[in-house]
Amino acid sequence: MATGRKGSTSKVGGVHFPDDDDPPGSPTRRDDQSNLSTLIAIPEKDGSYLVKAGFLKSHHCYEIVFSVPDVPTLGKELSCLPSSSPTRRSPSLRVHRINSTLEGVKVTCEYRTHQEGVLQEEITLVTRGRKDSSLKVRLQVRVIDPHHGTPMLLDGVRCLGAQRDVHSKHSSDRKRI
């Protein structure tokens, strides 16, 4: 029997979301550190490692957690050498924690995106007390313009939020006065 209606507007049933504030996989979801998956560093021919963190949005801050498989030449007490790039006044990549695990080394860092394109940052892990044993790790990201949508983040990458532009904040404050 035809009713002349093209679609049903009945709202029987519905969508049920988990009890958390944000659904799983949301870029702003705050997971416990132990539950956050990590990216895996890939060995390169020159003995260094490469971490591909996927697509990120420009002018945002991200937490990136990656693991480097067990490297016998490194000890258990590791630190990170400061970036050797003298042209940067504010570094994009900051290492917060380096933990030795049974599988290797787990590194937690913060990455601030400033420009679009394929970008690479390099860190050097060294054993405390032994400067001769070091390991270079390159972090590679693809940064997209903020107007091209929100990228789906890989496991081990978490968005900490958008960066505020200091200059635009001050200019907007002056307009209000």
Image (cartoon, helix red, strand yellow):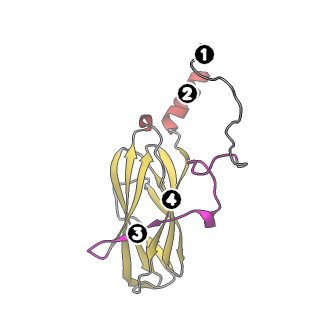
Residue 83 percent coordinates (x, y) = 39, 64
Please tell me which residue is depicted at 70% across the width and 49% down the height of the picture.
20
* Residue under label 1: 2
* Residue under label 4: 155
Question: 15 or 126: nearer the eye?
Answer: 15
The mark nearer the N terminus, 1 or 4, is 1
The mark nearer the N terminus, 3 or 1, is 1
Q: Residue furthest top?
A: 4
Quadrant (top left, top right, bottom left, bottom right) of the C terminus: top right
The mark nearer the N terminus, 4 or 3, is 3
Count up the numbered dots. Answer: 4
Q: CA distance from mark 2 to mark 4?
A: 37 Å
Stretch of the chain drawn in magenta: 21-47
Q: CA distance from mark 1 to mark 4?
A: 50 Å
The mark nearer the N terminus, 2 or 3, is 3
Does residue 30 belong to the magenta stretch? yes
What SS does tag 1 mark? loop
Q: Residue furthest front?
A: 1
What SS does tag 3 mark? loop
In-image side of 162 versus 22 (left or right): left
The crowding category of the residue bearing disc 2, from other C-alpha atoms within 10 Å (few below 14, some 14 to 19, many at least 20), is few
What SS does tag 4 mark? loop
What SS does tag 2 mark? helix
Q: CA distance from mark 2 to mark 3?
A: 43 Å
Q: Amino acid type of disc 4?
A: Asp
Quick check: 96 above or below 174? below
Q: Nearer the viewer, mark 2 or mark 1?
A: 1
Q: Amino acid type of disc 2?
A: Ser
Residue 106 percent coordinates (x, y) = 51, 72
The crowding category of the residue bearing disc 4, from other C-alpha atoms within 10 Å (few below 14, some 14 to 19, many at least 20), is some
* Residue under label 3: 41
Does residue 44 belong to the magenta stretch? yes
